[in-house]
Image (cartoon, grey):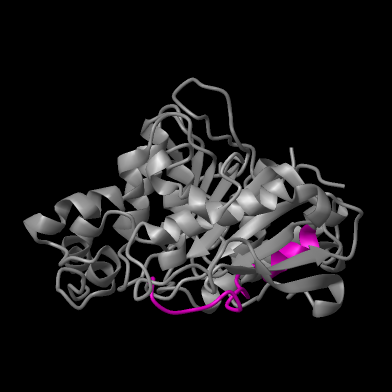
Amino acid sequence: MHGRFRCNAWLTLLLALNGSACDRALKTAGDAGATRVREVDAGDHSVSAGGVAAGGAEAGGSANGGAGGASLGGSASLGGSAGGPPCTTIPFVDELRPGDVPAPECPSTEFDVQTDIAYAPGPAHLLDLRLPLVGMGPFPTVIWVHGGDWDSGDKSDEKEAERVLCHGYALASINYRLASEAPFPAQVQDIKAAVRFLRANAVQLNLEQQHFGVFGSAAGGHLAALVGTSNGEAQFEDAALGNADTSSDVQSVVDWYGPVTFSSMDEELVQQGCDAIADNPNSPESHFLGCTLGTTACAGKAALADPLTHIDNHEPPFLIAHGTADCTVPLAQSEHLYNALHDAGNCATRARITDAGHGGAEFDAFAPQDLLIRYLDETLSR
C-alpha cells in the first residue's frame, strides 16, 4: 500500500519514547544525524532557520552534530510557482548534516531479480529489474542511471538506489551506450527507450504504467535531469530502439550531484576553491560531447546537453541533492537547476549535503536516504 509519509517496516525498528512509529523513527534519525533544516517558502523565498521535526515543530538542531537535531519532515510546502498550489510537503533543505548513521540496506531476500532483459536492439541495451517480494503490485518504478563520466560504469552499480526496494518500489537498473560507443545524445535516447519498453510491458512486468521515476548520480544525475526536462522532445527519441508509440515521459526525477551547465563548471569550481578541470579536450565533458568544451565550435552541443535549455513550466517534480565540498561538480550546478525549475513554475526541492564530496558515504546516511524515500512516496505513490 503506497501513501504519503508511509511508515516502512525497517523504520519501525528505530524506536523512541513518543509519537507514532514513523515519528519515533524520524526522531531517532534526527537525534543521531543532527540535521539542520531551513525551510524556504516557494512564494517569497523567506528563510526560517532551525530544526524541523516530523510534524513541523521546532526541534532545536545543533550545528555540530549533537543530539537534538531535526529529522526531515516539516510542514512547509513548495509551490510550483509563487502563490501556486503546493507540490510536495518535503522541505527545502538548506543544510543537511548526514551524521554517521547509515541507512539500513535492503537485503537480497526482500526482492526478486531478473537480469539482462533486452529493452532495445543491441548489446548495450540491457536492464536488470528488481521487484519487491512484499506487496502484490503493480509497483511504481525507479529507473536507475549509473554514473561514471558517461564512459564507464554498469547497471550493476545500483547500490545507491537499492534501498527503494524495501519501500515498495520496483528498481530497473539500465545499461546505456557509453560515450566511447556512441556520441551524445545516444545516452538520453537509450534511457527513454528503456522507459518506453517498461511502460509498454508494464502489465507483464507488474509495474504501474503511469508511475515511473528516473534517478541518477554524477553523470547519471545529469542524464536523469535531461531525461526529465526533455519530456516530449522528439530530438531525444529514437524510434528504431522500439516501442515508438509509447510515451517515454517520467513522473519524477532525482538528480544527485550531477552537472548541468558544462560551460560554467570551471569558473564555479575555481570560485569554490577547487581546480578547473572541464574546459580541455581530455575532460569527460568534452569526450561526452564529442568536442572541446569551452570552444565556440562546442557551444551548441553544450547547450543541447544542458537540462536548463529544455525547461518549461510542465516539468515533472525534481529532487536535487549535492555535497557542499564537491570539487568534481561544483555545488552551483545544482543551484542553477533548482532555480531554473522553480522560476519556471515547476515543483523542485533541493538538499545541500554538508561537507559531502562527489558522492560517498554521506549519501548513504539515513537522512539523505530518508529524504529520497519521502520524496518518492509523494511524487510516485499518489
Toward the left, the furthest residue is 296
Q: Residue drawn 18% across and 65% down?
A: 291
Query: Which of 353 and 175 lies nearest the eye of the viewer?
Result: 175
Q: Residue furthest top?
A: 83
Which residue shows up at 63% across the image and 38% down it?
Answer: 89
Question: Magenta stretch mostly in which secondary structure?
Answer: loop
Q: In the rendered view of the protein, which quadrant contains the C terminus?
A: top right
- Is residue 28 at least partly visible in the picture? no
Please tell me which residue is depicted at 56% across the width and 44% down the height of the picture: 244
Q: Tell me where residue 32 sits by quadrant.
A: bottom right
- Is residue 153 a member of the stretch shown in magenta? yes
Magenta residues (range)? 150-167
Residue 187 in percent (x, y) is at: 43, 61
Q: Position of residue 367 (x, y in %)?
A: 62, 63
Above or below residue 46? Residue 235 is below
Residue 239 placement, left or right of 67: left
Residue drawn at x 85%, y 51% as measured from the top left: 19
Q: Relative to residue 7, is residue 226 drawn left or right?
A: left
- Pick whichever, 195 or 254, lies toward us: 195
Is residue 355 or residue 194 the one in the foreground? Answer: 194
